[in-house]
Amino acid sequence: MKTLSPAKKWNKYFTAGLVMTGAAVFLGLLGLFWTPYSTTAMSAAERFAAPSWRHLFGTDNFGRDIFSRVMQGMGTTIVISTLVVLFSGAAGILLGALTGYFGGVLDEAVMRVTDAVNGFPSILLALVFISILGNGRQNLILSLGIVFVPSYVRIVRGEYLRLRDADYIKRARLMGVGRFRILFVHILPNILPVFGVSVMIGLNNAILAESGMSYLGIGVQAPDASLGNMLSDAQGYLQAAPWYALAPGMVIVWIVLGFSLFSEGIRRRVE
Amino acid sequence: MIRIEDLSVAFDGPEVVKNVSLEIRDGEILGVVGESGCGKSVTALTLMGLVAESARVTSGRIYFDDTLLLEAGRPRDKALYRRFQGDEMSMVFQEPMTSLNPTQRAGKQVDEVLRLHTRLDAAERRKKVLETFEAVGLKDAETVYASYPHQLSGGMRQRVMIAMAVILHPRLLVADEPTTALDVTVQNQIVSLLQKINRQQNNAMLFITHDLNLARRLCQRIAVMKDGCVVEQGETEQIFRHPEQDYTRRLLEAVPSRMKRRKSPYVPAEEQALSDPVVQVRDLSVYYQDGGNSLFGKKRRHCVVKDVNFEIYPGESLGLVGESGCGKTTLSRAVLGINRDIEGQVLHSTLRPQMIFQDPYSSLNPARTVGWQLQEPLRAQGATAVGGAMTRADMEAAACDMLRRVGMDERYFYRRPAQLSGGQRQRVSIAQALITHPGFIIADEPVSALDVTIQAQIMELMQRLRREMKLSFLFISHDINVVYQMCDRIMVMKEGRIIETGETEEIFDSPKEEYTKELLASARNNVQ
Amino acid sequence: MRYFIKKSITLIMTLFLVSAAAFLAFQIIPGDVVTSILGTEATPEREEQLREELGFNDPPAVRYFNWIADILRGDLGVSYRYSKNMNEMMPVSELIGDKLPVTLWLAALSLVLITAVSVPLGVLWARSKSHFLDALLGVTTQAAMAVPAFFLGILVTYIFGIVLKFFAPGGYVSYKEDFRGFLGYLMFPALSVAIPKIAMTARFLRNSLLTEMNADYVRTAYGKGCTGRRVVYGHVLRNAMIPVITFLGMIVAEIVAGSIVIEQVFGLPGIGRLLISSVSTRDLPVVEILILYITFVVIFVYFLIDILYRAIDPRISEK
């Protein structure tokens, strides 16, 4: 491998992104197992407590600790989004590789479908799938996963289409290398940088979509905490407790910004 | 008229132009020759005030007559430059396609020069542009005026670029490889045009090229550059006949030329005739489908290659020459069995003919190491072999052996293509093609993307391997001189047909077809 | 001309495909609509009667073509959930009626805001030589891209509505009563949809401009003696806009999606809220029609963008 100069390896984007993402992932995953306060315990005495050392982000309309709920919500969001990206990324590579390399009827069909799906707002499509499949976490992951497949297919297909006619692939064919070996051993390593960046972007889109769905009341359901449904609850109390809305909202911004800085940093490292 | 004194230019790193001093006199053509990366383009761009902002002039100055255009340590005076650019001095670039704005009509782009430097009204400007178009040999000037660059051919685009450069009769014309991207016959036309302009308008020209034959034909004086320095300059004939510097001598020797002794055929003709041909092509026609896009376009079947007959004997190298688009590549693909829509017969006596491509940068898989790539043909072969696959150690040994044969060693085994130079990559490509001992190789412009000195090395390597491994070549090239060096027989192709075939010497000495003579014209003026 | 015919045919075909897909998708939904409509009033007779009424006893293909034929005649079907009164079912067309313009205006306003702000911003950014401005815009746009539209909506509500009192949250003005008041209220949701997209588009345009500035023809233009300003506005901008237009086309769908979510935040009576409530109550006729509507709008905008694209890049129309 090429050795990277230190300036390139630890560019500002990469460092900032790594710190932000690391903190979010750590707190989020921790939040799935342990939180400072119970995420469901209500306390009438402590309704709408402003942020303090006792309750870092204050408390909500039921007197629940917002920091604890945000931690749990973060974890839920991150896990769901990761699963969504894994599902859609894997499907995207498979379909994109086959359609891009072989072309033909399958390609034509898949492209028509992805065109139609891409033209359709992703969150609405996920809504439609949810209304078909019904509510619930697995269905949420599956719906979002299906919705994001076309964007990966498009990118992977484009790369395969480009590399299909590269001289070194032509030569591999002449050598008699098998088709699937060309697809996954010769071409695949060359598209990983591009694919990696799109996975990062996809992760962000998944986080935004998941929190959007939960905000609309269609994703993660109460009493489980998610960043989206907390925001939706908090909106009614903007006047009385602005921190209630601010906390989950800013956390979403934190995660998304962290990931995009991180991917920008990686992009700069690769270049 | 132009004096460049002690010019040094650096980008972020070390200087790419070092203490260059050049003079250009009124009406003369000064050639600057050198291999890629020698700093010839940067010198020209600095003179024109077009070098990137990140470039720093670290020493020297440039005078246009008595006007000081540029001095080290002072920021570039853009307003001063703008008075000269397009009016007193102008430039023609290598790539006419990308050098023209793709979304503006050709006429308007030339018109802009007049708008910037004259006070003519719209009608006068239009008249002048059309006149200039005709003067540079664009026949249908009105149509060209209204065309976008993509609607014009390469030669026409370059004429538009030249029209843009000469419309105001500048005293200096800088031409940076103006013919490199063009076909041979078009090249000749453009060179004649530039010569004509030079004589008629009596302007000075700075002609930058890597092609020494061309420089000799065109220039009165020549400067040879290497690694940012001018190593030698003087009268053209003086330099070509009695080069003083080592580097110049090496450069001149590397240029493939008619006058050099050919190192071909190693296999005597009688012996060839006795054995069966490696490849036999009988009445081959190749078709391809076009406009087969979904429901609307009608499919049309074009004949790209028509009625081709030839055979290649063991150890023989057959040259295939012709301009781009004449069907050379299609023919080679059909011989390899990639194009399926064919009529006629292709018979091979070898198992898997291999191919070497032009671009060393896309011939190797950037994600894999050299060693891995060298073993891949063996692995592929092993998968279908009857007697079982080679062992891992055997394959590694074979790969190392092949690396040595192409003049590299085991150190390169674990390197990736990005860490190799163009010449090294081409060596690895050759090694990869030969590792399965295919016996027959199609080489599609294998040295065209390389600098002359590297080109000479690769050609020598291919000749050596041909002898050692009894290889047969189908050698495709647009460079008639390279073909002369490499091939025993030559086929000339035009518009899908083979119009002439013969022994190399025969073709060169007494070409029958008009087209062949035209192709050879570029090879006439030779270096030695 | 041929191009227009071709495009229109593609448009119609896509609509057919989407309608078929939507129709099919809702065939495989678990749960019986009839029982859920009737709820506790369900008796076998009533169920059978309703089935007949809704045409559930026909085979799917027949029902699909009946449905399409009805739509073409302007009959969009009836809602399963809402009813006009005890005896009459609510036609979908009436349900959607005055909601559609709200969403369309919101999306249009957002698109206008995005183009109007991001293009000058991108040019300014690409041309600026100040490191400070460059870094400032870099950080701001990066951050703006990370804010989800609905949270931005909440922030806008809080800052402009509650703190600054520029508008009354929830005080929607119908476009039928006071069009200027309607647009004035719509400005804030449109802003929430637009800000992240403005950041994206400006970044994209800046990168496109910087890439384009390295093109060979830029050198040619300088070689003629053009000033930097002339090079940017006369040559580079048009070429740099080509990928930006593609990009704008790509985010049209996102703008529509953003508008639908943002309706929820600002309490706008658009089709977004109707869609979400219909999805959660499985009011299928409404959902199907809304999907068709949205698809049509998005495809139509693509169509317009395609025309713009052709106008700006002469290389396209040749093929």
Image: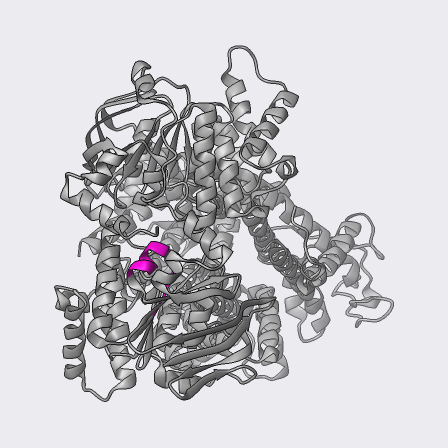
Question: Is residue A12 toward the left or the right of residue B61 in the image?
Answer: right
Q: Residue furthest front?
A: B242
Q: Residue at x 21, y 58 (%)?
A: B189
> Residue B89 or C293: which is nearer the viewer?
B89
The quadrant holding residue B120 is bottom left
Q: Per the image, is B214 magenta?
A: yes
Q: Which residues are magenta?
A: B206-217
Residue B484 x %, y %: 32, 39
Q: Is residue C95 visible?
A: no
The quadrant holding residue B390 is top right
Q: How is the image coloured?
A: one colour
Q: Quadrant of the N terminus of chain C?
A: bottom left
Q: Per the image, is C151 magenta?
A: no
Question: Is residue C80 toward the left or the right of residue C60 in the image?
Answer: right
Q: Is residue B143 visible?
A: yes
Above/below status of B200 relative to A145: below
Residue B133 x %, y %: 18, 70
Q: Residue furthest top?
A: B387
> Residue A268 or B137: which is nearer the viewer?
B137
Question: Is residue B399 toward the left or the right of residue B318 in the image?
Answer: right
> Residue A208 or B359: which is nearer the viewer?
B359
Residue C38 x %, y %: 48, 43
